[in-house]
Amino acid sequence: MLGCLVVSNYGARRDLHLLVGPRPAPAPVAEPPAQGGSIMIVLGTDAPLNERQLRRLAVRATFGLGRAGSFASNGSGEFCLAFSTANRPSHRADDAEVSQRLLRDDSPALRELFEAAGEVVHEAVLNSLCSADAMEGRDGNRVEAFPYELLDDAPGVLRA
């Protein structure tokens, strides 16, 4: 099992490169100067992974981020973390050694987790964009909500 939590700030809407192909030109909207945004991604799994494998899993999150239209502009900060709940060592034990169960690096299960990381991040980013409400920020900057309908023609977006 693999879950994902995303907190996204894409910065300016023009920096969202998800929407490609022919579409009506949007009404001009005054935007602050492009400074980039930042996205925090947390992946959680119950698979038995060590710290190196978790780092490799976190790196795969960036593929989902790219699939969702990010290009990681100069001023942006993308942070990806991964954790596992599989191995819970006791804080007090009589044994001097601890043994843990881990997935092998060449296992099909680890490959599936890597593939799933891109998919869950892609979906989580789209959900975070579309679930946000319109808001007014600092200095009177207003951002309208991002409607799901804009994703109808976006590449790689699955429809139910």
Image (cartoon, rainbow, N blue to C red):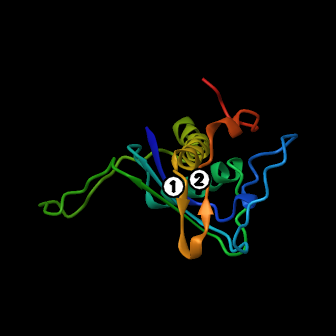
Q: Is residue 9 left or right of residue 5?
A: right
The disc label shown at residue 88, or none: none
Q: CA distance from mark 1 to mark 2?
A: 13 Å
Q: Disc 1 vs disc 2: which is toward the camera?
A: 2
Residue marked by disc 1 = 53
The C terminus sits in image quarter: top right
Residue sitting at x 67%, y 70%:
36
Within-10-Å neighbours for mark 2: few <14, some 14–19, many 20+: many
Q: Residue furthest top?
A: 160
| The image quarter in which residue 143 lies | bottom right
Q: How many marks?
A: 2
Residue 96 in the image: state x and y as whole percent: 20, 64
Residue sitting at x 57%, y 37%:
112
Say which label, 1 or 2, has the lower sequence index: 1
Residue 27 in the image: state x and y as whole percent: 78, 52
Residue sitting at x 70%, y 57%:
70
Q: 55 and 100: which one is in front?
A: 55
Residue marked by disc 2 = 61
The N terminus sits in image quarter: top left
Q: 108 and 81: which one is in front?
A: 81
User: Mark 1 touching mark 2, by CB under 8 A?
Assistant: no
| The image quarter in which residue 33 lies | bottom right
Residue 72 in the image: state x and y as whole percent: 70, 65
Q: Is residue 94 left or right of residue 160?
A: left
Residue 66 in the image: state x and y as whole percent: 70, 53
Q: Is residue 65 shown above or below 92?
A: above
Q: Amino acid at mark 2?
A: Ala
| The image quarter in which residue 30 lies | bottom right
